[in-house]
Image (spheres, rainbow, N blue to C red):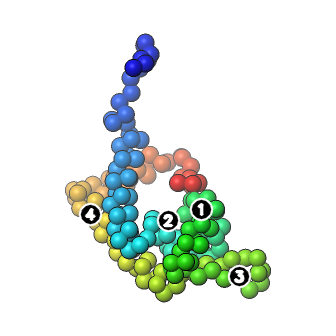
Amino acid sequence: MLTMPNAPSYDLHAALGYQLSLTARVIEKRFEDGLKGLGLTRLYWCILLACTQEGLQTPSEIAAFVSVDRTAVSRALRQMEDAGLIRRESGERDRRTTLVQATPRGADLLAQANRLARANSAHFLAKLGEGDKARLTALLDRLREGEETRLPNL
């Protein structure tokens, strides 16, 4: 083992970033396991949210909303179209523009996924005591204060 003399130690497991990241991963994994049962991924769910609830129609708009590379979104759109979750059409004014729309099957799965998302959130929030949710939200807001919150390629 290589050690550096006089180098200050760092307790990874006590670090704020590690604790926040670990907690986020636990919450996300539980949700993603539920999505898997519907045949969805978190990216598919986000894309369905973008093109239905947010009214975003182009792959570029969707990629920006989801904070994922345009190439990854295009790949996911192809897979989602093959699975019957979305439909892609050329724009009326500009035939080079691709417009994305959820199919009835995609909209139905989105409704089911949204129920899972709400249940997942409720599961973890139930672990907090009275007032803890508001305090946690305020503390997280304070940590992000003055920081760039639009993070590409998450």
Label 2 SS:
helix
Mark 3–mark 2 distance (CA, rounded to whole Å): 23 Å
Give the mark nearer the N terminus: 3 vs 4.
3
Mark yes or no: residue 61 visible.
no
- Badge 2 amino acid: Leu
Q: Mark 4 highlights which residue?
A: 123
On screen, 132 above or below 62? above
- Badge 1 amino acid: Ala
Q: Which residue is at a point 30% across and 69% down the rendered structure image?
A: 119
Q: Nearer the viewer, mark 3 or mark 4?
A: 3
Give the mark nearer the N terminus: 2 vs 4.
2
- C-beta proximity under 8 Å, tags 2 and 1: yes
Q: Which residue is at a point 60% across and 66% down the rendered structure image?
A: 75
On screen, 72 above or below 92? above
Residue 26 in the image: x percent, y percent?
33, 53
Dot label at residue 90? 3
Dot label at residue 43? 2
Q: Depth check: 73 or 127 in front?
A: 73
Mark 3–mark 1 distance (CA, rounded to whole Å): 20 Å
Label 4 SS:
helix
Mark 3–mark 4 distance (CA, rounded to whole Å): 42 Å
Give the mark nearer the N terminus: 2 vs 1.
2
Q: Is residue 34 left or right of residue 50?
A: left
Q: Nearer the viewer, mark 4 or mark 1?
A: 1
Give the mark nearer the N terminus: 3 vs 2.
2
Q: Mark 1 highlights which residue?
A: 72
- Badge 3 amino acid: Ser
